Image (cartoon, helix red, strand yellow):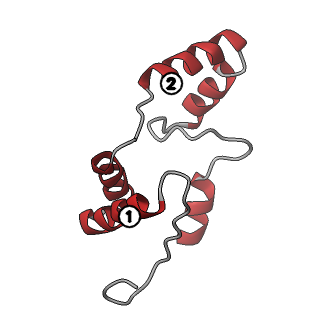
Amino acid sequence: MAENQGEASKPKGRTHNFPEVTSAKSRDAVATALKNPTTRAMVREERHKQKELIDDNKKIEEVASISSKDKEVGKLIAEVMEKVGKDGVVTVDDSNAIGNS
């Protein structure tokens, strides 16, 4: 029975990524509001105002640390990003081993 409860709590149909909106009615209200071109333009403008350029090694380390939930991993990713440059590609895999290669 516990498996079915998880399935029942998942929203059906197209959803948007709004973690702060918890109820299905709220999600539906937000999705409906975003169908309005004026609302979409306002949201786009607000997102543009809040945009922050991540351009130095310290900011990259902060973002990587938050994303990985590990300060050491964030530092390692920042070091690698510095080596490969802004147009480089970094691939990260999960591992149970200790250390890096």
| Residue 34 as seen in the image, left or right of residue 52 | right
Residue 91: mark? none
Residue 77: mark? 1
| Residue 58 as seen in the image, left or right of residue 4 | left
Q: Who comes first in sequence, dot 2 or dot 1?
A: 2
Q: Amino acid at mark 2?
A: Arg
Query: Where 95 sits versus 32, above or below?
Result: below
Residue 44 % position (x, y): 58, 21
Which residue is denoted by mark 2 in the rendering? 47
Secondary element at image label 1: helix
Residue 1 visible in rendering: no
Can you say which quadrant of the picture contains the N terminus?
bottom right
Q: How many other residues sit within 10 Å of disc 2, few (<14), some (14-19) or many (≥20)?
A: few
Residue, x 31% and y 85% (percent of image)? 99
Residue 60 % position (x, y): 36, 50
Report the mark closest to the observer, 2 or 1: 1
Which image quarter: residue 32?
top right
Q: Amino acid at mark 1?
A: Ile
Residue 41 % position (x, y): 63, 14
Residue 8 % position (x, y): 62, 56
Query: Where 66 sits versus 76, above or below?
Result: above
